[in-house]
Amino acid sequence: MSEIKLDKNIEGYFDYLEYEKKYSKHTVINYKDDVREYLEFLSSEHLTYTSIKYEDIRFYLMFLKDNKNNNNSSIDRKLSALRGLYKYLANEGVVSSNPFSLVSGPKKEKKLPRFFEYNELEELLNTPDLRKPLGQRDRLILEMLYATGVRVSELVNIKVSDINRSMQNIIILGKGNKERIVEYGDYCEESLDLYLKDGYFRLNIHNSSYLFLNNNGEQLTDRGVRYILSNLIEKTSINKKISPHMIRHSFATHLLNNGCSLLSVQKLLGHDSIKSTQVYTHVSTDRLKEVYRNSFPRAKEKK
C-alpha cells in the first residue's frame, strides 16, 4: 500500500487513540492502514474525506467486498476505524456530521467453536508424566479444564481453599467478579488428590494459596497454561491446535451431545446470556438422529 500523506486532522485522530484512548500500537497501526486505504479510494473517485456523503459509502463497501475481497470481519473493523475517525473530526469541527454513524457493518460469519473428540481428550489426558510434580500439575490442569469448563483466567486464580472436596465442587470468581460453583467428578478428584499429596507439596516452596504453581513455586499465569498445553499436544498424535478455550468448548459440546439442556450448560459456563451459549448447539447428526428415532412415534421401527 502506498504511503498516502495524512493531514494534521487525521494525524490528530491517531494521537488521540494512542495517548488519550490508550489503544495499543498494533491497533493504531491497523487503523492507519485502514484510513490510508480509504483515502486512496476517495482519491480514485475524486472525493475528499471532508465532502463524503452517506450515499457515497456504499461504493466504498462495494470496493472492499468486490475489489479487495475483504471478509466481513475485516470490513467491520475498517468501518469501526472510520466511524471513530469521523466522530473525532465532528467533535473537532472539521466536518459537520459523521456519515459513518448510520452505516452498519456486515454480519460476521458465524464460526463454530472448535472442540476435541472424547478419544482425543483421553490421549491428551494420558500424556503428562505422573511421576513428576509438573506432570501431576499438568494432568490436573487438563482434568479440571475439561471437568468444569472454566476459563483459563478462572483456572489460574483457583485457591486450594476454594475447593470443597467432600462436595466435589469449586467456588469460581468469574467475569464481573461474579461467583459461581462448578462441579467436578471422580477422575478430576483422583488427579487433585495425587497433586495435593505430592506435586503441590514439592512445588509450593513459598507457601502459596494458589492451586496451580510454576516450577518456581509461583502462581501459574494464563500464558503459562497455554504454553503447557502447546507442549503437551506436541507429544500426541492429535493434529489440532490447542487452547484452554478449546477444552471449554469440548466441555460444553459433550454435555449438549449427551442430552444436557442449554440452560444448564449456560449456568455451568457462567454465561450471563443464553445467546452466548447457543453457539454450542451444533450437536452431532448422529445424536440428532438418535433423539429423533427414540422420541418421535412415527420414526420408530414397526414391530
Image (cartoon, rainbow, N blue to C red):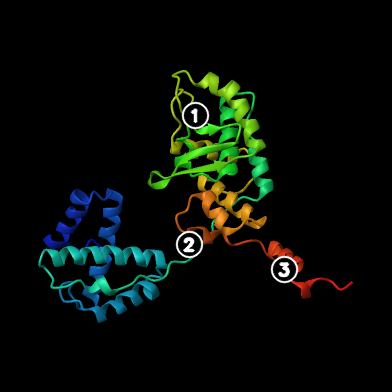
Are discs 2 and 3 less than 8 Å apart at CB? no
Q: Is 141 situated left or right of 66 in this image?
A: right
Are discs 1 and 2 less than 8 Å apart at CB? no
Measured as percent of width and height from the top left, residue 284 is found at 66, 61
The amino acid at mark 2 is Lys
Q: CA distance from mark 1 to mark 2?
A: 33 Å
| Earlier residue among tags 1 and 3 | 1
- What residue is at 63 percent from the left and 55 percent from the top? 260
Q: Quadrant of the N terminus?
A: bottom left
Q: Which residue is mark 1?
A: 161
Q: Which residue is mark 3?
A: 292
Q: Quadrant of the C terminus?
A: bottom right
Image height check: is 11 above or below 269? below
| Earlier residue among tags 2 and 3 | 2
Q: Which residue is mark 2?
A: 275
- Picture quadrant of residue 81: bottom left
Q: How many marks?
A: 3
